[in-house]
Structures are given as C-alpha cells and as structure tokens.
Amino acid sequence: MRVVLHLVIAALSISIVTQLSAQGFDGGVTETLQSIYIPPLVGAPFSATVHTEWVREIPGGGTYTAVNQRRVARDGRGRIYEERWLLVPKDSGVESKMNVVQIADPNQHTLYNCWVEQRRCMLLRFTEPAMTSYEPGVIPTGPLANNKGFTNHLDLGIRTIAGLDTHGTRDTTTLLPGTVGNDRPFVTVREFWTAPQLGVNLLSIVDGPRTGKQTFTLSDVSLNEPDPQLFELPEGYQVVDRRQEPAQQGHASDQDRR
C-alpha cells in the first residue's frame, strides 16, 4: 500500500513511493496529519515543543507508529511561529528534519509558509483577527442531524500539565451504520486538556477508525516572551506573494481545533 503524507512523510517512505510511481502503479492515498491549533491570542506569549505520535492499525493485527517533535511560539502581539518536521517511523533510527516554517501575523494579516529546501516563502492572506480572549467550542451531548448518530460530552475536570492548570473534556461521536459507508457503528473519541491561560491544548488525543490514534503533547512550556527573531523571515529566502488567492482562515486546518 502506498501512503503519501503531505509535509509529514518519512524520507524512507518518500523513496519507496517515488520508485513505485516511476513504475506506473495505480492506486494509493494522500493523507495530511493535522496538529494543534494555536489561536492568535494577544497578551499570552509562550513557547513550547509539540510531540506527535500517530498510531495506526495494520490489517490482521499490530500497529505502526510515526513520531516527530517541533517548536512553536506565540508572542504578546498574537504572532505565531510554527516549525513543521517530517514524521518518521518510531524507533527506526530515521532522522526527522524540518521542512516548513510558518509565521502568521494577525495584525498585518500575513501568513508565510517557508519551505526549507527550496528556500522559498509563500505569502498568503491571514484573515483570523488578533484575539483578546479565546474559548474553545463545546460539542453538546445529543443526537446528530438527521439521526445519523449521537455525541456524548464529558467534563474531565482540572489537571496540571507542564506546570499549568488545564481543563479536560472528552467528546465521543458515534455514527450509525450506513452514514459514511460504514457497516457498523463508527466511533471517534476526542480528548482535550486546555490551558485557559494560553488558549492552547497541552494534551490532545484523537482516536478513531479513520484517524488512528493521534496524540499531541506539549513540553518545555515557557510563558516568557519568545525571541523576536523567530517572527522574522529566514534570511536569503525568496518570497512569492499569493495574497490574491483565497484567504487562509487560520494558519493550519486543524483536528485539534474544536
């Protein structure tokens, strides 16, 4: 089976996929792993390391796991810095590498996606406004539209993570057979531990048939103002202005966002 992951494929897998593509094989699938959502919240600077673990089942038994870690930061003006690193097989000895740097500015309405190997930055419009407060949405317990299933929302209380108080919730969504081509109930569980001080989830777990089990954990959390140099464009990169294209609502589409 060929699996291509935009921005997050391991170098070994890229080599295999390239060889298969050159031979003209049909089929395959393209996947994108979403990560955490960082709102452009002003007055709440922080920096941290995001650890990702993605576990998927192997047909017939067993699992395969991909991992990475990356640096993120937000300054007091709401500007957001994120590194994107390739996912690699866990315990494989394959080294990850950074392939994209993203810099979003809600005040200037700019989003730069900077590709490391090409040394090129794509400039897009960033339409999310700077926020003075952020409250994640709540999925209420009850039936889904058209009786296609139901959801259950559970409050998990307060827990300290990385030295910060977090509030936990768990949302379980069940889709009835036939809703999305499924022949049995389709259950997805999303658990979030949000630090209200930052408006960011310090621990997120998404587990379902389509996603596998995705765990995002923040460590090395600092509440100090990050280095201003992070929000400057990398030196020597070409900038391609694409702000005439459809605007980007948020710096990344994100499964961690509710």
Image (cartoon, helix red, strand yellow):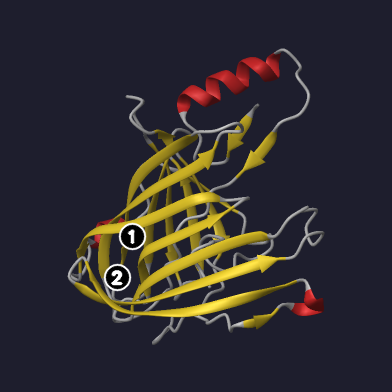
The percent coordinates of residue 13 (x first, y second) are: 52, 25
In terms of secondary structure, where does tag 1 sit?
Answer: helix
- Mark 2, Cα crowd under 10 Å, few <14 / some 14-19 / many 20+, is many
The kind of residue on which mark 1 rests is Phe
Q: Can residue 87 be seen in this view?
A: no
User: Residue tagged by mark 1?
Assistant: 231
Q: In this figure, which residue is indicated by the disc labeled 2?
A: 75
What residue appears at the point 67 percent right and 61 percent down from the top-left corner?
A: 244
- In which quadrant is the N terminus drawn? top right
Residue 66: x and y, percent?
43, 38
Q: Is residue 75 left or right of residue 138?
A: left
Which residue is the extreme one toward the bottom?
132
Q: Where is residue 154 in the image (x, y as percent from the top left)?
A: 47, 79
Going by the numbered disc 2, the residue's amino acid type is Asp
Q: Residue at x 76, y 53 (%)?
A: 182
**Which residue is at 56% across, 69% downward?**
172
Can residue 68 be seen here? The reply is yes
Q: In this view, does 219 lie above or below 57?
A: below
Nearer the viewer's eye, disc 1 or disc 2? 2
Q: Which of 168 and 39 is in front in this view?
A: 168
